[in-house]
Each structure stands twice: as C-alpha cells, then as structure tokens.
Image (cartoon, grey):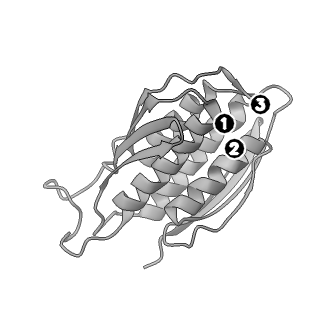
C-alpha cells in the first residue's frame, strides 16, 4: 500500500506544490522562498523519515504571512491524503524533545478532528525575516487541514532558533509514531469504526 500524495494550490497570493511519502527515507527537496522554513521542513522530513518535496512561491514582497499560512494548508491536505483511511495505524503520538537549553512537548491524535492547542512564547518576535507569530498560523492551518488534534507546548527555551527547530523535530517524531502500523490494530483504532 502506497502512502504517497501530491497536492497543488494556486491563488493570487501563493503557488504551492507539495508531495509526501509517509514511508520514505527522510529525503527532501524544499524551496519556499523563506530560508528558515526550508531548514525546518528539511529537518521535519529527516526526523520523520518522510520523503518530502515542497515548491512554494508567494508574495514575500508583502510579508511572509500568506506563504506561511498556505504552506500549512497544503502540508495538512497532503498529510491527510497520504494517510488515507488510517487503517492499522497507532493514531496517537507524543514526543518530548530537548535541544540544548530548549525543551518542547508535542502530543497529537490523528482523530480527523483538526485543532491546534499552542502554548508557545518565543524568546524573540523576529527570526530573520519571519514574525514568529506566523508559526501559529502555519501550525493552525496544518492541524485543521490534516484533521490532526495537535498540542504544542514550550517547556523551556531562551533561543528562538532552537525553539522552532525542536518543535519541528518533535512534530516529525510524534507523527512518525502515530502513523506507524501496529499489527494488533484491525481497521482503525476507534470504537466508532472511523477516524473523522
């Protein structure tokens, strides 16, 4: 069974194509026009063992908002499509990820009911050319479009780069766990018989 999907989205503000193989090797080709997001999505693929290609062009001359939000939308849609009916998967994942002085907790449920619960106070409001509040927009769109119940909590951090790197790595590890198969699961892991 192939767990691969590709989705394109084009608006007056952005033009984005994402392909995702959930059973990959951590290979990626990323071009978003935002170097820090290229770095984050590259390590997301690596630490989740996902093969991920992202091509995004946005109105960065305005600011990063439209690109960040629309990246979250397309990433969420492609995850939902690649995961399919979620038969046989563990469904839940969590990871406590340390990175030097930073510690973050990611907990998630591939329930089909998307929602973001975000307790993160970045040490700085700007990271290169990104307003760090835009990460909330990215994760909100990603959670809603993927049908992911997603909790992101900052436990400790005083370095903004480390904070978001830890979040993306922790998210990758938790998703890898939730998307992995368990031979004991027959159909989907729900008494309802469906994850939606």
Q: Position of residue 156 (x, y in %)?
A: 46, 29
Where does the N terminus fall, quadrant-wise? bottom left
Mark 2 or 3: the one toward you: 3
Q: Compare residues 179 and 69 and report the one nearer the observer.
A: 179
Q: Earlier in the sequence, mark 2 or mark 3?
A: 2
Say which residue appears at 82% left-offset and 33% top-offset: 60
User: Could you tell whether 32 is left or right of 138 in the image?
Assistant: right
Spatial CA span between label 2 and label 1: 9 Å
Secondary structure found at label 1:
helix
Q: CA distance from mark 1 to mark 3?
A: 14 Å
Q: CA distance from mark 2 to mark 3?
A: 11 Å
Q: Which residue is mark 2?
A: 37
Q: Nearer the viewer, residue 183 or 105?
A: 105
Callout 1: 10 Å neighbours few (<14), some, many (20+)? many
Q: Which residue is mark 3?
A: 128
Name the residue rendered at 66%, 56% in the picture: 42
Disc marking residue 157: none
Q: Is residue 90 above or below residue 92?
A: below
Foreground of the two, 183 or 152? 152
x 62%, y 35%: residue:
69
Q: Is the C-beta separation of discs 1 and 3 under 8 Å? A: no
Which quadrant of the figure has residue 158?
top right
| Mark 2–mark 3 CB contact (< 8 Å) | no
**Label located before the other in sequence (1 or 3):** 1
State the residue at coordinates (60%, 38%): 162
The residue pinned by badge 1 equals: 68
Choose mark 1 or mark 3, whichever is in front.
Answer: 3
Res. 143 image quadrant: top left
Provide the secondary structure element on which disc 2 rests.
helix
Q: Quadrant of residue 8?
A: bottom right
Mark 2 in CB contact with mark 1 (< 8 angstroms): yes
């Amino acid at each position: 069974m192939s767990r691969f999907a590709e989705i394109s989205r084009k608006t007056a503000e952005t033009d984005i194509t994402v392909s995702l193989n959930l059973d990959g090797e951590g290979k990626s080709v990323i071009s978003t026009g935002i170097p820090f997001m290229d770095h984050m999505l590259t390590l997301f693929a690596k630490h989740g063992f996902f093969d991920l290609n992202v091509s995004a062009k946005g109105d960065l001359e305005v600011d990063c908002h439209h690109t960040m939000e629309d990246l979250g939308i397309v990433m969420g849609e492609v995850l939902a499509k690649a995961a399919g009916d979620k038969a046989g998967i563990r469904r839940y994942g969590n990871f406590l990820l340390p990175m030097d002085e930073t510690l973050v907790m990611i907990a998630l449920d591939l329930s089909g009911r998307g929602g973001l619960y975000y307790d993160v106070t970045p040490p700085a409001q700007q990271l290169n050319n990104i307003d760090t509040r835009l990460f909330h927009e990215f994760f909100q769109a990603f959670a809603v479009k993927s049908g992911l119940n997603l909790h992101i909590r900052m436990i400790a951090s005083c370095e903004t780069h480390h904070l978001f790197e830890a979040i993306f790595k922790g998210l990758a590890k938790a998703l890898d766990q939730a998307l992995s198969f368990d031979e004991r699961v027959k159909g989907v892991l729900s008494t309802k018989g469906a994850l939606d």
